Image (tube, rainbow, N blue to C red):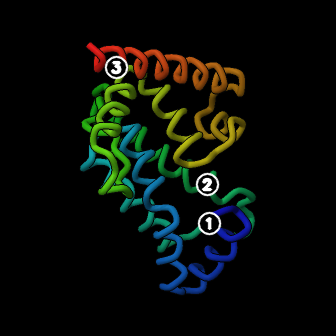
Amino acid sequence: MQNTQLRAVLAAVRAGSEDAFDQLYDALSTPVYTIALRITGSRTAAEDLAQEVFLRLWQSPPDEAVRNPRAFIFQTVHNLAVDHLRKQHTEPLPDTLADPGDPIGDMLLRETLRRAMLTLTPEERETVSLHIDAELRFHEIAALTGCSLSSVYRTYKRALKKLRTALQTDERSDEI
């Protein structure tokens, strides 16, 4: 759901429309959950954080003054996940990175991707997830994370290089 549609849906949510909220949830629950999962590394925490995001959106949706509601929502996820990690005082280690919206997907591919994602640092996983899952542009990720645009871009490029290497290594080990 792009910002234009999102603004209209949020206006309806502000007016109390449960149908609009259902539409919002259907459109954004998977990327919200996935970003929370990739930041925290915990399915349980990601579920709780996604629930918290949507509870906040129902109780107090952003008003018309918010120019980029998608970024606002993913900023909320990011902030809640980072706060969760600070409270835990642990380094996030993902227990899974499978796509929660694809239960029939190829398990072997998902396991390969999960192993490849484990080679990334938490910052790299977050940047990749925000760009791919949340469909945020690099300047939006920079604003959301408080990093410079060049830093976000370098982090993303470094992560892609690590992923390629990990996937190629995994391919070679399958041939043996």
- Residue position marked by numbered label 1 in the rendering: 62
Point 53% across, 86% down: residue: 16
Disc assigned to residue 72: 2
Q: Give the side of residue 23 with respect to residue 91, left or right.
A: right
Of the numbered discs 3 and 1, the one sitting upstream in the chain is 1
Give amino acid for label 3: Asp
Point 46% across, 15% down: residue: 165
Using a 10 Å C-alpha cutoff, classify the residue at mark 2 as few (fewer than 14 neighbours), some (14 to 19) or many (20 or more). some
Image quarter in which the N terminus is found: bottom right
Using a 10 Å C-alpha cutoff, classify the residue at mark 1 as few (fewer than 14 neighbours), some (14 to 19) or many (20 or more). many
Give amino acid for label 2: Phe
Q: Secondary structure at mark 3?
A: helix
**Is residue 45 depicted above or below 155 in this figure?**
below
Q: CA distance from mark 3 to mark 1?
A: 44 Å
Q: Give the side of residue 154 with respect to residue 25, left or right.
A: right
The answer to whether marks 3 and 1 mark residues whose Cβ atoms lie closer than 8 Å is no
Q: CA distance from mark 2 to mark 3?
A: 37 Å
**Is residue 35 depicted above or below 30 in this figure?**
above
Residue 172: image quadrant is: top left
- Residue position marked by numbered label 3 in the rendering: 170
The answer to whether marks 2 and 1 mark residues whose Cβ atoms lie closer than 8 Å is yes
Q: Secondary structure at mark 1?
A: loop
**Nearer to us in this view, 87 or 119:** 119
Q: CA distance from mark 2 to mark 1?
A: 8 Å
Q: Secondary structure at mark 2?
A: helix
Residue 48: image quadrant is: bottom left
Residue located farthest toward the front when viewing the structure as drawn: 175
Point 25% across, 36% down: residue: 95
**Nearer to us in this view, 111 or 45:** 111
